[in-house]
């Protein structure tokens, strides 16, 4: 369903990565790893269509995402490094606002169900400015619990600021997405255990050094 061919990205005189190829089929999860500055976030933003690569193509269901923006956007859920939560809105209002922007049904019941999934049902009406960073992160991740789950999740450091219970909840959401035939791409620097079957793409920060689709079979995710 998702194919990257010959991806390269250059910033100034520095090449972050080049000649990068990979494919993901339904039910697969890919962990993008690498040291700080290797280009992990940049790669995720390219795959999400938010940045243009220096070279290469990203295809969704066989079509270049630049020619299928509407269809690709409808199938995509992107949670970036920043939470994208509006402080003046409550947790529930944030979810309904985001759903409306995506053209989805923004019902109160659906929003409350999503917040319950991430353990924030008791905070639904609290303005986001009064939430902790971990709680704001959970509001952002509650977008993944929409009634119509997006086929592709792109998650940049989704485990940041989460306690152990929230980490387990997120892992459960990822496992459910994979079991339903969805795709997940994520970055993570914490020492956490990712769902079984997760693959790993190491960005070495130098052209030609990437290693794609190694089984992520360690007990945790190295920094």
Image: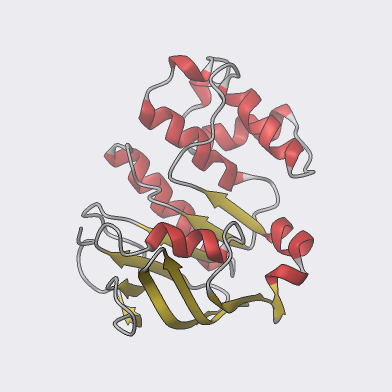
Residue toward you, 199 or 84 = 84
Vertical arrangement, residue 126 with respect to residue 195, above or below: above
Residue 203: x and y in percent read: 32, 72
Residue toward you, 79 or 171 = 79
Residue 119 in view (yes/no) = no
Horizontal side of residue 128 vs 50, given as left or right = left
Quadrant for residue 32, please give it. bottom left
Image quarter hosting the N terminus:
bottom right
Q: Residue at x 53, y 33 (%)?
A: 116
Residue 208: x and y in percent read: 33, 85
Residue toward you, 105 or 116 = 105
Image quarter hosting the C terminus:
bottom left
Q: Residue furthest front?
A: 13
Q: Residue at x 54, y 35 (%)?
A: 84
Horizontal side of residue 212 vs 105, given as left or right = left
Vertical arrangement, residue 63 with respect to residue 73, above or below: below
Q: Number of labelled discs?
A: 0
Q: Residue at x 20, y 65 (%)?
A: 219
Residue 194: x and y in percent read: 33, 61
Residue 207: x and y in percent read: 34, 80
Residue 139 in view (yes/no) = yes
Horizontal side of residue 48 vs 220, given as left or right = right
Horizontal side of residue 109 vs 126, given as left or right = right
Q: What colour scheme has been applied to the protein in the rendered image?
A: secondary structure
Residue toward you, 164 or 55 = 55
Vertical arrangement, residue 109 with respect to residue 53, above or below: above
Q: Residue at x 48, y 28 (%)?
A: 120
């Amino acid at each position: 369903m998702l194919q990257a061919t010959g991806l390269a990205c250059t910033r100034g005189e520095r090449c972050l990565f080049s000649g990068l190829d990979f494919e993901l089929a339904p039910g697969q999860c890919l962990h993008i790893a690498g040291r700080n500055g290797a280009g992990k976030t940049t790669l995720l933003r390219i795959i999400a269509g938010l940045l243009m690569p220096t070279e290469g193509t990203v295809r969704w269901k066989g079509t270049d995402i630049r020619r299928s923006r509407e269809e690709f956007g409808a199938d995509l859920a992107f949670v970036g490094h920043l939470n994208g939560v509006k402080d003046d809105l409550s947790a529930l209002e944030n979810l309904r606002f985001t759903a409306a922007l995506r053209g989805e049904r923004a019902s109160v019941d659906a929003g409350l169900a999503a917040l319950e999934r991430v353990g924030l049902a008791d905070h639904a009406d609290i303005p986001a400015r009064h939430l902790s960073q971990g709680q704001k992160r959970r509001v952002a991740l509650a977008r993944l619990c929409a009634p119509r789950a997006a086929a592709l999740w792109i998650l940049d450091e989704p485990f940041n600021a989460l306690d152990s219970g929230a980490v387990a909840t997120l892992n459960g959401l990822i496992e459910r997405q994979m079991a339903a035939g969805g795709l997940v791409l994520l970055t993570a620097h914490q020492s956490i255990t990712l769902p079984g079957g997760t693959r790993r793409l190491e960005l070495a920060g130098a052209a030609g050094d990437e290693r794609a689709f190694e089984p992520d079979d360690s007990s945790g995710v190295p920094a």
